[in-house]
Protein backbone atom coordinates (compact mmCIF):
# COMPACT_ATOMS: atom_id res chain seq x y z
CA UNK A 1 0.00 0.00 0.00
CA UNK A 2 2.90 2.32 0.79
CA UNK A 3 4.36 1.85 -2.71
CA UNK A 4 0.96 2.62 -4.26
CA UNK A 5 0.78 6.02 -2.48
CA UNK A 6 4.36 6.85 -3.39
CA UNK A 7 3.66 6.04 -7.02
CA UNK A 8 0.57 8.25 -7.05
CA UNK A 9 2.46 11.05 -5.31
CA UNK A 10 5.28 10.74 -7.87
CA UNK A 11 2.85 11.12 -10.80
CA UNK A 12 1.09 14.09 -9.19
CA UNK A 13 4.41 15.90 -8.69
CA UNK A 14 5.47 15.01 -12.24
CA UNK A 15 2.18 16.37 -13.60
CA UNK A 16 2.53 19.62 -11.67
CA UNK A 17 6.07 20.25 -12.92
CA UNK A 18 5.21 19.36 -16.50
CA UNK A 19 2.45 22.02 -16.50
CA UNK A 20 4.76 24.85 -15.50
CA UNK A 21 6.04 27.36 -18.03
CA UNK A 22 9.61 28.30 -18.72
CA UNK A 23 10.67 31.77 -17.61
CA UNK A 24 13.08 32.19 -20.53
CA UNK A 25 12.49 34.56 -23.44
CA UNK A 26 13.04 34.06 -27.16
CA UNK A 27 13.69 36.78 -29.73
CA UNK A 28 11.44 37.20 -32.75
CA UNK A 29 12.70 39.16 -35.76
CA UNK A 30 10.17 40.71 -38.12
CA UNK A 31 11.29 40.89 -41.76
CA UNK A 32 14.66 42.36 -40.85
CA UNK A 33 12.99 45.54 -39.48
CA UNK A 34 12.75 45.04 -35.74
CA UNK A 35 13.04 42.40 -33.03
CA UNK A 36 11.14 41.75 -29.83
CA UNK A 37 11.52 39.04 -27.18
CA UNK A 38 8.66 37.07 -25.66
CA UNK A 39 8.39 34.57 -22.82
CA UNK A 40 8.61 31.00 -24.08
CA UNK A 41 5.00 30.38 -23.04
CA UNK A 42 3.79 32.84 -25.71
CA UNK A 43 3.47 31.79 -29.34
CA UNK A 44 2.63 33.39 -32.67
CA UNK A 45 -1.07 33.85 -33.38
CA UNK A 46 -2.46 31.72 -36.17
CA UNK A 47 -2.67 33.54 -39.52
CA UNK A 48 -6.38 32.75 -39.89
CA UNK A 49 -7.16 34.07 -36.37
CA UNK A 50 -5.42 37.44 -36.16
CA UNK A 51 -5.66 39.52 -33.01
CA UNK A 52 -5.44 42.68 -35.13
CA UNK A 53 -5.33 42.63 -38.94
CA UNK A 54 -3.02 45.70 -38.97
CA UNK A 55 -0.40 44.07 -36.74
CA UNK A 56 2.97 43.00 -38.13
CA UNK A 57 3.58 40.78 -35.08
CA UNK A 58 1.04 38.94 -32.90
CA UNK A 59 1.85 36.71 -29.94
CA UNK A 60 -0.39 35.15 -27.32
CA UNK A 61 -1.16 32.50 -24.77
CA UNK A 62 -4.86 31.70 -24.55
CA UNK A 63 -4.50 29.73 -21.30
CA UNK A 64 -2.62 32.52 -19.51
CA UNK A 65 -4.84 35.13 -21.16
CA UNK A 66 -2.03 37.40 -22.35
CA UNK A 67 -1.87 38.89 -25.83
CA UNK A 68 0.57 41.12 -27.74
CA UNK A 69 0.54 42.98 -31.04
CA UNK A 70 2.91 45.36 -32.79
CA UNK A 71 1.54 47.88 -35.27
CA UNK A 72 3.89 49.85 -37.49
CA UNK A 73 3.06 53.16 -39.09
CA UNK A 74 5.23 55.28 -41.35
CA UNK A 75 5.83 58.90 -40.42
CA UNK A 76 3.60 61.19 -42.47
CA UNK A 77 2.76 64.89 -42.67
CA UNK A 78 -0.20 64.36 -40.33
CA UNK A 79 1.57 61.97 -37.95
CA UNK A 80 5.14 63.14 -37.72
CA UNK A 81 5.88 62.99 -33.99
CA UNK A 82 5.52 60.45 -31.21
CA UNK A 83 2.78 62.36 -29.37
CA UNK A 84 0.47 62.54 -32.41
CA UNK A 85 1.03 58.82 -33.08
CA UNK A 86 0.25 57.98 -29.45
CA UNK A 87 -2.89 60.18 -29.47
CA UNK A 88 -4.20 58.51 -32.62
CA UNK A 89 -3.64 55.00 -31.22
CA UNK A 90 -5.12 55.96 -27.85
CA UNK A 91 -8.22 57.35 -29.56
CA UNK A 92 -8.66 54.11 -31.54
CA UNK A 93 -8.42 52.01 -28.37
CA UNK A 94 -10.79 54.17 -26.36
CA UNK A 95 -13.49 53.83 -29.04
CA UNK A 96 -13.69 50.14 -28.14
CA UNK A 97 -13.84 50.48 -24.34
CA UNK A 98 -16.65 51.20 -21.91
CA UNK A 99 -15.69 53.43 -18.98
CA UNK A 100 -11.98 53.54 -19.92
CA UNK A 101 -9.46 54.63 -17.32
CA UNK A 102 -5.95 55.89 -18.02
CA UNK A 103 -3.84 54.37 -15.28
CA UNK A 104 -0.48 55.97 -16.07
CA UNK A 105 1.60 57.61 -18.77
CA UNK A 106 5.40 57.96 -18.93
CA UNK A 107 7.95 59.33 -21.38
CA UNK A 108 10.98 57.03 -21.62
CA UNK A 109 13.50 55.51 -24.02
CA UNK A 110 13.70 51.93 -25.24
CA UNK A 111 17.13 50.88 -26.50
CA UNK A 112 17.99 54.52 -27.15
CA UNK A 113 14.77 55.30 -29.03
CA UNK A 114 12.22 57.88 -27.83
CA UNK A 115 9.20 56.13 -26.35
CA UNK A 116 5.99 56.68 -24.41
CA UNK A 117 4.35 54.09 -22.18
CA UNK A 118 0.82 54.09 -20.85
CA UNK A 119 -1.73 51.82 -19.29
CA UNK A 120 -5.51 51.69 -19.65
CA UNK A 121 -8.30 49.62 -18.21
CA UNK A 122 -11.83 49.12 -19.47
CA UNK A 123 -14.49 46.71 -20.62
CA UNK A 124 -14.48 45.95 -24.34
CA UNK A 125 -17.65 47.24 -26.04
CA UNK A 126 -19.90 44.61 -27.56
CA UNK A 127 -18.66 41.66 -25.51
CA UNK A 128 -21.86 39.96 -24.48
CA UNK A 129 -20.14 37.02 -22.83
CA UNK A 130 -18.20 39.00 -20.23
CA UNK A 131 -18.08 42.26 -18.37
CA UNK A 132 -14.49 41.56 -17.39
CA UNK A 133 -12.24 44.58 -17.18
CA UNK A 134 -9.19 44.35 -19.44
CA UNK A 135 -5.76 45.83 -18.72
CA UNK A 136 -3.86 47.32 -21.66
CA UNK A 137 -0.18 48.31 -21.45
CA UNK A 138 1.10 50.18 -24.50
CA UNK A 139 4.51 51.40 -25.63
CA UNK A 140 4.96 53.79 -28.52
CA UNK A 141 8.43 53.87 -30.04
CA UNK A 142 9.81 56.29 -32.62
CA UNK A 143 12.23 55.03 -35.26
CA UNK A 144 13.80 57.05 -38.08
CA UNK A 145 10.98 56.50 -40.58
CA UNK A 146 8.39 54.49 -38.63
CA UNK A 147 6.44 54.49 -35.40
CA UNK A 148 5.85 51.24 -33.50
CA UNK A 149 2.92 50.58 -31.21
CA UNK A 150 3.47 47.61 -28.89
CA UNK A 151 0.29 46.63 -27.05
CA UNK A 152 -0.14 43.85 -24.51
CA UNK A 153 -3.34 43.02 -22.70
CA UNK A 154 -4.71 40.65 -20.10
CA UNK A 155 -7.44 40.58 -17.47
CA UNK A 156 -7.30 43.61 -15.20
CA UNK A 157 -7.03 41.39 -12.11
CA UNK A 158 -3.87 39.79 -13.59
CA UNK A 159 -2.03 43.05 -14.38
CA UNK A 160 0.41 42.79 -11.48
CA UNK A 161 1.15 39.17 -12.34
CA UNK A 162 2.42 40.15 -15.81
CA UNK A 163 3.77 43.68 -15.31
CA UNK A 164 7.42 42.62 -14.96
CA UNK A 165 7.25 40.42 -18.08
CA UNK A 166 5.49 43.15 -20.04
CA UNK A 167 8.31 45.56 -19.20
CA UNK A 168 10.88 42.95 -20.31
CA UNK A 169 9.03 42.60 -23.62
CA UNK A 170 8.93 46.39 -24.13
CA UNK A 171 12.59 46.80 -23.20
CA UNK A 172 13.62 44.05 -25.64
CA UNK A 173 12.36 46.04 -28.63
CA UNK A 174 15.15 46.97 -31.02
CA UNK A 175 15.46 48.09 -34.60
CA UNK A 176 17.49 45.89 -36.89
CA UNK A 177 19.97 47.84 -38.96
CA UNK A 178 20.99 46.33 -42.26
Image: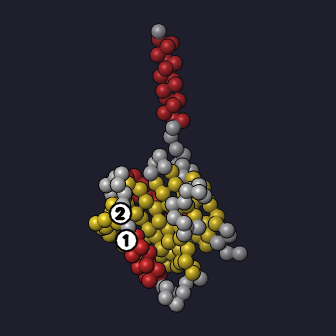
Towards the viewer: 108 or 82: 82
Q: Are the residues flagged by discs 1 and 2 in contact, CB closer than 8 Å?
A: yes
- Give the crowd class for mark 1: few <14, some 14-19, many >=20 residues within 10 Å: few
Q: Quadrant of residue 159?
A: bottom left
- Identified at 58% across, 67% down, the residue is 56
According to the picture, the residue beneath numbered tag 1 turns out to be 95
- Identified at 35% across, 66% down, the residue is 97
- Give the crowd class for mark 2: few <14, some 14-19, many >=20 residues within 10 Å: few
How many numbered discs, if any? Answer: 2
Residue 131 in picture, x, y percent from top left: 31, 55
- Identified at 54% across, 46% down, the residue is 22
Quadrant of the rendering where the C terminus is positioned: bottom right
In the rendered structure, the answer to whether residue 124 lies left or right of residue 73 reads left
The local secondary structure at tag 2 comes to loop
Towards the viewer: 79 or 50: 50
According to the picture, the residue beneath numbered tag 2 turns out to be 125
Tell me: residue 9, above or below residue 20: above
Tell me: residue 58, above or below residue 40: below
Towards the viewer: 169 or 119: 119
* Model colouring: secondary structure
Residue 95 in picture, x, y percent from top left: 37, 71
- Identified at 49% across, 88% down, the residue is 78
Residue that protrudes farthest toward the right in the picture: 178
Residue 167 in picture, x, y percent from top left: 46, 62
Residue 109 visible, this angle: no
Q: Quadrant of residue 176?
A: bottom right
Residue 126 in picture, x, y percent from top left: 36, 61
Residue that protrudes farthest toward the bottom in the picture: 77
The local secondary structure at tag 1 comes to loop
Q: Earlier in the sequence, mark 1 or mark 2?
A: 1
Residue 138 visible, this angle: yes
Amino acid sequence: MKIYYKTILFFIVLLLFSCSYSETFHEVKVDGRYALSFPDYMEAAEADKPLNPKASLQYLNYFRNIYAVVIEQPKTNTIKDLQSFQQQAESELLQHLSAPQRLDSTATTINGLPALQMAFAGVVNGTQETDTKIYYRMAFVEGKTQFYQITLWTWYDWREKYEEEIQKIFNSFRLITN
